Image (spheres, coloured by chain):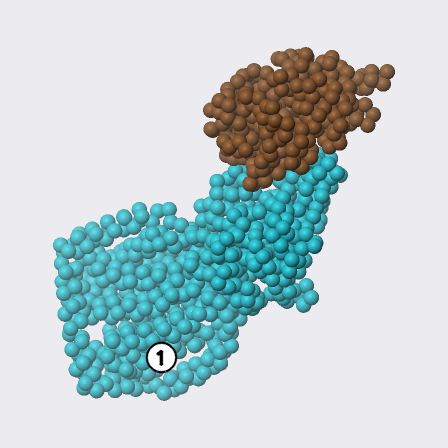
Chain colours: A cyan, B brown
Amino acid sequence: MIEQLVLRLQRAFFAHRLATLLSLLAFTVVMGGFAAQLSMSAGFDKQLPQNHEYVKTFNQYRDVLFGANRIIAVVHPKTGDVWNEKALTRLYDVTQALFFMPGVDRRTVTSLWTPNTRAVQITEEGMKAEDVVGGDVTVNALTPEAISGIRERTVIGGFIGSLVANDSTSAMVVAELADPDPKTGERLNYLDFSRRLETDLRDKYADAEIEIQIIGFAKQMGDISEGATSVIEFFALAFVLTALAVYWYTRSLVLTFLPLACSLVSVVWQFGTITLLGFGLDPLAVLVPFLVFAIGVSHGIQQVNYIAKEVINGADGYTAAVRSFTGLLVPGTLALITAFVGFATLALVPIPMIRELAITASVGVAYKIITNLIMLPVLASYFRFDEGFVLRAGKMESLRNRLMVRLGVHIATPRNAAIGTLVGVLLFGVAVWQSQGRHVGHVLPGAPELHDDSRYNKDVESVVSRFALGLDLLTVVVETPKDGCFIYENMAYVDRLSWHLANVPGVLSAQSLPVMAKLANAGVNEGNPKWAALPREELTLGEVVRQVPEGMRLYNADCTVMPINLYLADHKASTIKGVVDAVKRYREQHTLPSVTVRLASGNAGVQAATNEIVEHSELPMMLYVYATILVLVFLVYRDWRAMVACCVPLTVATFLGYWFMKSLDIGLTVATLPVMVLAVGIGVDYAFYIYNRIQMHLAHGEDIVTAFKQALREVGVATVFTAITLSVGVATWSFSALKFQADMGMLLTFMFMMNMIMAITLLPAIAVTLDLLIPRRRPVAAPLMAH
Amino acid sequence: MRFFTLLMVALTLGGTAAQAATEPVTPAMSARLAAQVPLTAMARAGDRLVAVGDYGTVVLSRDNGQHWKQAHSVPVSSLLTGVSFINATHGWAVGHGGVILSTIDGGENWRLAYRVGGDPVLLSVRFLNAATGFVVGGYGTALVTHDGGATWTRLSVGEGDTADMHLNKLFVGRHGDLFIAAEMGAAFRSTDGGAHWTLLDTGASGSLWGGLQRRDGSLMLYGMSGRVLLSRDDGANWTSVPGELSQALADAIETPDGELVLVGSGGVMAHLSPGSTRLAVSVRDDRQNLAAIAVAADGTVFVAGQSGVLPPLVNKP
């Protein structure tokens, strides 16, 4: 029935070759028009599971809480400290520059030079506050006496560690961003702002002696967007490398042109579709076109391989194209459907970015069925191949065949097959064992999207090591009824909770309103530490709370929100999870009707949400993909042996991939979860192509060893080469300025190669071993896709 | 007459004190970082060092301060402000919320011995023997017990303007005289076990945070503005010790070799060697507020403050 359908399709397309191609061309032109309108989108929010408890808290309070909109510029003399005229003058300049920079909330600009930096001393007469840089000191009058006065007041005011480095080798300017702009209501463009920081701050004030370091969420986002745009260059590089590889393989310009052109066409369609769906290209999704292109080329290789073999065997171009169409339509479709299902299951992960990726990738793969399985052979039928090509290709062919036959002999002998299977099982065991305790989330310090040696992460490392400052922040949000912070019970609850959390391993410090209010109470009681407790009386408590600067963002105007800011030692998933679990246990065991404890904001809080989703999604995703593969394999071959032979090598490769991730410190993240799922969906192609031939030869009555040798001779080289082409395409990502793109590139390259190696070694070994251990009782049925 | 009325009121209040307590107490939580909690007072219990501080934290060291561990059980979690031992096992501690705690095992386990009505802030505790002890605190709070802390009677220390002053610390002088360092330069003496108190003329205007009796019988008071006062005549006359110091001094000890060591706000440490007439002042680099100082059994001096117990002092200026 299927064969009849294939024949009918073949007649339909090849009888109307020109009409087919022209309509496809028209479609391409239309889609190209839409594709031209595609734009990059930064998409930080899209990385977050929007319906997760923690992310809801984050979104609700993102404008209220500390840190999200903070930008820090640090003046760092390369030698010596900041207590000299040059460094302090530079600090003044940077303070001014940040003050006048569009997007900065001027009221919040803080450095030694700003009037909101005051040193408070408690004396018998009461509290005495003075500007750290005295009112009479100007940039032009930085005498040694003036500088030593500034230094003394900096220490008294407690600004060592906050505005000046612990070792006095740096000084910082802190500011909050006005986002959205209070006048226009527009959101801040992080990319533009980040570029302004480079031109108006870093380029202007950094020199041979003084370094300017800039950190903060806006800068991080800006740098990520900047890095994402560089991907276009990799696409060009991948295209050239792929073209060279395909030419080396085919030794024919025509056969090189066909798969590349058809794959490009599907990428154009895909871009057009993305625009029509209203998506932009974010740093994660920008990689999908690469992948779709690479998949297209790899299926294209199967087509040109088929065509070349037919031509070498004496067929003319038209006949070769027709045969290739009929021969590959079914296995190609099946392989693409598997990849499609693999991509589509990703849509079940409740993270918008992965959903978009799932949609764009599955659309791209669906288009492949048209461009690679229909358009390519139809287009190929117009080309003629001369004698020279037949000779050249024939020579290449026999050389490669010899290689494959030798490989086949080695693998498929019963003894070696048994050994191979055993080795496979052992390897599987080792991989499972070694991949235990895989990392979830981001493992290395700094902004996880960027490389360790990126400018931003170097700045972060330098600043964090010099200042009493943590960048991995998890904020627990405590909600109370209005004016809740004037009630002793609420404050005492938050106080005890923050002390409890300060003791959780991985927490460096816990900042909260009651902790500050206690210090303020000591302050109003002559600075006596024995009064550093919360007053029980409402009015006194209110007075003390008002002593805590609003700028610390430890309470809001209504006093309905009291965040507990936890600075963590790192943002490893295990660290974050320990803290999150501690909060959950505490709020279950200690309830107070007027207090609601919510998780979690801060970069670590948001990561906790993503980690939980990613971790819980992985297994179901994998199971769906494997289930799809098993169902498809069963439908096609009606043979449980095929299911084992196809899926066991895939599973081994998957676990080898986990091992690879663990040893390279690549965590399971929004970026790598799709990779593992995609790798299985694409990796099964090799198994399909090889097992298909084995089955066919078995159906012709050959024994398993001969069947495999034949299969390897027919498709072995193409399979190896397909994997190499795919790898070339994704390996270029490894040079990306964005760490997660590089991680994805390395991981995908590894997975493609591994799946291929497993398909030509472990798959036949298992097939042979199975037939030896459990001999078949019935003859083998020809596969659906035989021709 | 007025005195007796006050005493009657005080006695009535004292009698109902335990019932009048409003705030339920929560036991101190066991904390990994107990020795880094803000600490306010330290004392010796035999060979042990015992320090108290925020969140009802009590930390102990049995090896002269090399290792510190949290007390096994403390029934309250409010800020503790004072600790006093009469021997290696029996001790008392006080804190915010009017709590008076006692231990009979050298500070490992504590029980809530008494809760002063109205949740006053208690600042200092001192026992003369197993039966008689005193606590003082904010707004003129002062109580005495004669039955080992089971029942307490209110004392009235100041009068008129001085009646609701914060009473910062109670210490014992020669012949069993009692002294209280108080707010705004005030200090009080009682020669009859706390029944009557006289205001001393210290000449100081800033609050006095503490005081002690030296081994030679002379007295010292200290407090805000780096003030250090000495008296050789049981508090009748005081002389100020000069020193380049503006920070408040919170606690003091006399070392076995007769040196006075004081600690205070802003990481200040002051030394007064025997025979010297000036304070030698040093400031810790971290400028953290120091609240307590104690000498371990082996003579090592320890200070504690905002970030808990600090490493032992090795260098003297």
Quarter residue A233 falls in: bottom left
Between residue B143 and residue A1, name the one nearer to us: B143
Q: Is residue A75 left or right of residue A532?
A: left
Residue A138, percent across and down? 66, 58
Between residue A497 and residue A781, name the one nearer to us: A497
Figure label count:
1
**Quadrant of the rendering where the C terminus of chain A is positioned:** bottom left
**Residue occupying the point 51% across, 43% down:** A507
**Residue occupying the point 53% across, 18% down:** B46
Between residue A120 and residue A361, name the one nearer to us: A120
Q: Is residue B18 left or right of residue A252?
A: right
Residue A676 in view, yes or no: yes
Residue A182, percent across and down? 68, 63
Residue A42 in view, yes or no: no
Residue A670, percent across and down? 45, 58
Please tell me how crowded label 1 is: few (under 14), some (14-19), or many (20+) other residues with Cα within 10 Å.
Answer: some
Q: Look at label 1 and name its amino acid.
A: Ala
On what subunit does the disc labeled 1 rest?
A
| On screen, residue A316 above or below A76 | below
Between residue A263 and residue A599, name the one nearer to us: A599
Residue A380, percent across and down? 30, 82
**Residue occupying the point 76% across, 15% down:** B195
**Quadrant of the rendering where the N terminus of chain A is positioned:** bottom left
Quarter residue B74 falls in: top right
Residue to which mark 1 is pinned: A261
**Residue occupying the point 25% across, 61% down:** A757
Quarter residue B187 falls in: top right
Q: Secondary structure at mark 1?
A: helix
Q: Is residue A458 left or right of residue B286?
A: left
| On screen, residue A255 above or below A471 | below
